Amino acid sequence: MARRSARTALRIGACFVVSVLCTAGFPRAAYSIELSARDQATAVRIAAVPGLTPELDPLYQEVLDLLLDGEKEEASLAAEALLTGFRQEYGSDSTLLATPSLYLGLLQLDIGETYSALSHLDRAAKLIERQYGRFDQRLIPPLRGLAIAHIETGRSSSATAALRRAQHLTHRHMGVYNTDQLPILDMLLTVGGPSSRGEMVDTLSSFNLKVHEEAFGKDDPRIVPALMRMAEHLANKGARKRPRSYFVLLGGSADFVAQSHAFRESLRHSERALEILEQHYGKDDPRIIEVLRMIAETKLKRGLGKGDAVAAIQRAHDIVAANAGSDVSDVAYAKVELADLYTLWDDHRAAKAYRDAWEAIPESEQYDTLRYELFGEPKQLSTDRFELALRERPWRKGRINYLELGYVVRADGRARRFTTIDGNVPSQIKERLRGRLGQARFRPRVVDGEVVETADLTIRREFNLY
């Protein structure tokens, strides 16, 4: 499943970062903009802004009007003018500057002025803390804004610290299982990616599910995203704990036991999500497709249960094909997904499945782009990014250490016939990259419904030093 970016995870479907942050745990009297994306409408509520005078009110109204018109850059400039007006009225050290500093920081964050946003959000947090104390819930929005800025500038540890503090404040003011912390948990689970901080992600994923269950009940469809996130994490965890050899596997190594447990638990959560959706929406509802894909993906990572994985993807395809809202691309992608699964399993049925997908697309120029997207060139199906590292040596410093290989992708989706085009790395590194590439699987190119070999492909990798 594609991982969401940090920014996407934070917005939670709202129009602007402003709306996400200002509505989470900030006292009603302390903020003045509340934006909602529901039904594509923007609702604005004007509350009391501390320190807003009749002279400053026109500047504030300009910020609101520009936001309503979607003019975020201009709204940012207006917010800067508002902050300047507050400084002139109250002095640069007044705690009344907290709200306009917060607005400016959030708007700058939304238009990509990240470093300026960091400065204003940090200033807002310090002013709020000075006036109300370090445990005041008014700190939650600037802390979340700071977390986004830290993520976007590569400071994951600072982002985590800000998010942890914001989460603690929600616990302090709203209870341990409050739903206001859900976007914070989502951000915490996003920071650093799926392969790091194993124990921390275990704890966060479990707690995220517990919060959903406490808030909505254990059989409510609203807990399905948390179940799916838990299932995805456990499947990735199982894939990382592969035994180092077949003999270790037979001996019942700790890695093998942990791997088996992770995969079992992943499937348990996925099957629970599937059961909940089936009970509420029926066995043919399109909402169960993502769960079926997760089950198939977990089976694939585990290396067992090929028949179950194929059955899950076939069922997803049948739901798409039978759905009145599905178009040509939906059906074609569903068929290709089944064919890809066969390729990953080295199953000879892949060729026929790709032919079926080809034939599902009508012979018309309007579908040429779709046909090319699916079949125009080989596409890697395995997740290996072929990233390798070299030991640091004096002669490797100050230069680009790289390797460029040529290869072909056969009709069965395997990469073969490797040639060295250029590079300056040792021969054993070349062999390692060739080995990794040889283990990968690709969706082959398809011409007139038949899978074909593709030659003259190249891959170039630059190597970091360690």
Image (cartoon, rainbow, N blue to C red):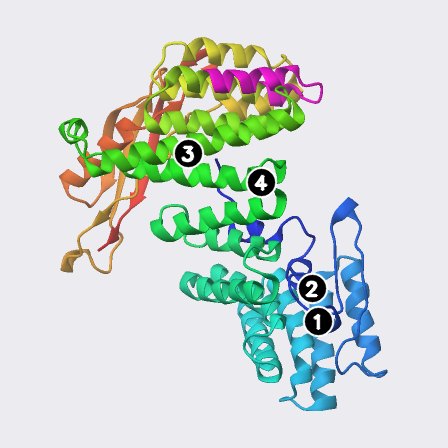
Residue drawn where x is 55% and y is 22% of the image = 333
Q: CA distance from mark 4 to mark 2?
A: 37 Å
Classify 138 as above or below 170: below
Residue 81 falls in image quadrant = bottom right
Closer to the camera: disc 4 or disc 1?
Answer: 4
Residue behind mark 4 = 223
Mark 4 secondary-structure assignment: helix
Residue 449 appearing in the image: no
Residue behind mark 3 = 266
- Mark 3 and mark 1 residues within 8 Å of each other at the beta carbon: no
Residue behind mark 1 = 77
Q: CA distance from mark 3 to mark 1?
A: 48 Å
- Mark 1 and mark 2 residues within 8 Å of each other at the beta carbon: yes
User: Of callouts 3 and 1, which one flags the residue occurring earlier in the amino acid sequence?
Assistant: 1
Classify 245 as above or below 92: above
Closer to the camera: disc 4 or disc 2?
Answer: 4
Residue behind mark 2 = 73
Over which residues does the magenta segment extend?
Answer: 311-331
Residue drawn where x is 15% and y is 31% of the image = 248
